[in-house]
């Protein structure tokens, strides 16, 4: 059962990031995907970043909220990801100051080895990978 939850979390996060990128491109506006409470394991929110500051603010348009609710899935990230992913209108992943944003999420059952990695490249594209193979 944990394997199903991990796969669901990985594919849901992958879809959220891809949709946020496509929204930034199609609407020509920055889009922010931010972890809930600073922890991706809690879930994430997708917002249009109206003031282009890279912060998730309550007055900005909410597009999606995903809550995992501590359902036995562990999501870790490297420093390149941090607490939020910021998409510019051209679809690239950049920090609000302009620095590159790329890195990996590692997803696993709460007590297991990583089962999936979600890789974000500087162009803003994501792909699912198997740890140790990609």
Image (tube, rainbow, N blue to C red):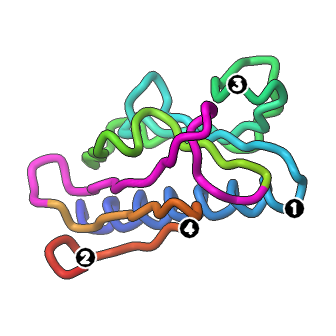
The rendered magenta stretch, by its main secondary structure, is classed as loop
Residues under labels 2 and 1: Cα distance?
30 Å
Location of residue 95 in the rendering, given as x and y in whole percent from the top left corner: 56, 38
| Horizontal side of residue 28 vs 116, given as left or right | right
Residue 114: name its quadrant: bottom left
Q: Which residue is mark 4?
A: 125
In the rendered view, would you say 99 is above or below 18? above
| In-image side of 95 versus 31 (left or right) | left
Q: Secondary structure at mark 4?
A: loop
Q: Are marks 2 and 1 in contact (CB under 8 Å)?
A: no
Report how far apart the C-alphas of labels 4 and 1 lie in the structure. Answer: 15 Å
Viewer-closest of 42 and 29? 29
Q: Which is more N-terminal, label 4 or label 2?
A: 4
Residue under pointer 1: 26
Between circles 3 and 2, the one closer to the viewer is: 3
Pointer 3 or 2: first along the chain? 3
User: On the image, numbered disc 2 is attached to which residue?
Assistant: 130
Residue 52 in the image: above or below residue 29: above
The outermost residue toward the right is 27
Q: Nearer the viewer, residue 25 or 4?
A: 25
Instruction: Looking at the image, tell me whether mark 4 or mark 1 is earlier in sequence order.
Output: 1
In the image, residue 119 lies in the stretch drawn in magenta? no
Q: Nearer the viewer, mark 1 or mark 3?
A: 3
Dot 1: element? helix
Q: Residue at x 31, y 39 (%)?
A: 79
Image spot of residue 93 (x, y percent): 58, 52
Question: In the picture provided, is 51 more to the left or to the right than 43?
Answer: right
Left/right placement of residue 81 relative to residue 115 reads: right
Span of residues in magenta: 90-113
Q: Of callouts 2 and 1, which one flags the residue occurring earlier in the amino acid sequence?
A: 1
- Vertically, is 27 above or below 128? above
Q: Nearer the viewer, mark 2 or mark 1?
A: 1
């Amino acid at each position: 059962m944990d394997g199903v939850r991990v796969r669901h979390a990985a594919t849901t996060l992958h879809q959220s990031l891809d949709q946020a990128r496509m929204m930034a491109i199609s609407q020509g506006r920055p889009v922010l995907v931010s972890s809930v409470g600073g922890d991706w394991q809690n879930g994430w929110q997708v917002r249009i970043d109206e003031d282009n500051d890279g912060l998730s603010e309550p007055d900005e348009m909410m597009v999606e909220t995903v809550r995992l609710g501590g359902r036995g899935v562990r999501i870790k990230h490297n420093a390149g990801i941090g607490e939020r992913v910021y998409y510019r209108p051209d679809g690239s992943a950049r920090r609000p100051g302009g620095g590159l944003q790329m890195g990996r999420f590692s997803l696993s059952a709460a007590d297991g080895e990583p089962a999936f990695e979600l890789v974000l490249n500087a162009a803003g594209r994501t792909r699912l990978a198997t740890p140790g193979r990609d």
